[in-house]
Image (cartoon, grey):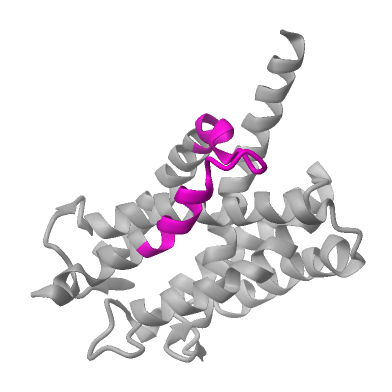
Amino acid sequence: MKEKFLYLFLDVFTLAVPLLRSFESKIAYYKSFLSLLKAIALTGLFFIAWDVAFTVYGVWGFNDRYLVGLSIFHLPIEEWLFFIVVPFSCIFIYRVLNFFLGDTQNRLFQQQIPAFLVWFPLGVAVLNYQRVYTLSTFLLLGLFMGWHIYINKTEWMGNFIRAYALILIPFLLVNSVLTGSWIDEPIVWYNDAHHLGKRIGTIPMEDAFYGLLLILMNLSFYEFFESKRKKDLSRT
């Protein structure tokens, strides 16, 4: 019976430490909760629609053995929570690194990796147009990253890449469980016809880029709303 709470436990585990540390005076993450809520809501609309479509289409699915049993629009409640707790925790990591390390001056993070994350995903998408998970993830990431780098010229991109390099550690841990490591069956299964078949342990390679796109989109809205909030505060 306890195994039915496994995905829910992973959601709680992901959220626990960032939430508890959000009210510390140094980081004061709680002061930006409204900006964060708006960012999560807007990004969630897109990703949940994507998730529902791919679930219905059979690109991926969920194992009832590890779910509490409540679903909304074909998605288990744990999956809905995923799109809240993961951005919340990842942007917390971003904020903490910015506070303690300041803006990165590392050329690799500021220029080289962002440029790679434009052209490599676009190339993969073109070469794998018949695989719907691969195509959609890499095409959207390449286009969105290209907008940030070449059009918007986003100043915080280096800070984001630095943060995501650290985020990959808990990502690999949690996503390994979701995809079947250390348990009898995967919580989330993938149709092999729709992805490259390359895995990091049990994790489809696409997931690392899907996660990058998810956090980048959340952070884009978050930084926009935070900038607006701080400007409004400066006028008062």
Q: Is residue 220 visible?
A: yes
Foreground pick, 226 / 204: 226
Task: Specify the farthest residue to the top.
Answer: 236
Is residue 34 inside the magenta stretch?
yes
Going by the image, does 178 lie left or right of 161? left
Foreground pick, 85 / 201: 85
Residue drawn 65% across the image and 31% down it: 226
In which quadrant will I find the C terminus?
Answer: top right
**x and y, in percent, of residue 105 in the image:** 91, 59
**x and y, in percent, of residue 120 in the image:** 72, 74
In which quadrant will I find the N terminus?
Answer: bottom left
Foreground pick, 179 / 125: 179
**x and y, in percent, of residue 99 in the image:** 74, 49
Residue range of the region highlighted in magenta in the rendering: 13-36
Q: Can residue 57 be seen in this view?
A: no
Foreground pick, 18 / 5: 18
Whether residue 174 is situated above or below residue 199 in the rendered picture: above
Going by the image, does 183 lie left or right of 85? left
Residue drawn 84% across the image and 52% down it: 103
Task: Specify the farthest residue to the front.
Answer: 25
Quarter of the image holding residue 2? bottom left
Quarter of the image holding residue 159? bottom right
Is residue 31 inside the magenta stretch?
yes
Task: Specify the farthest residue to the left.
Answer: 1
Going by the image, does 67 lie left or right of 59? left
The secondary structure making up most of the magenta span is helix
**x and y, in percent, of residue 63 in the image:** 19, 75
Going by the image, does 225 lie left or right of 53? right
Residue drawn 58% across the image and 49% down it: 217
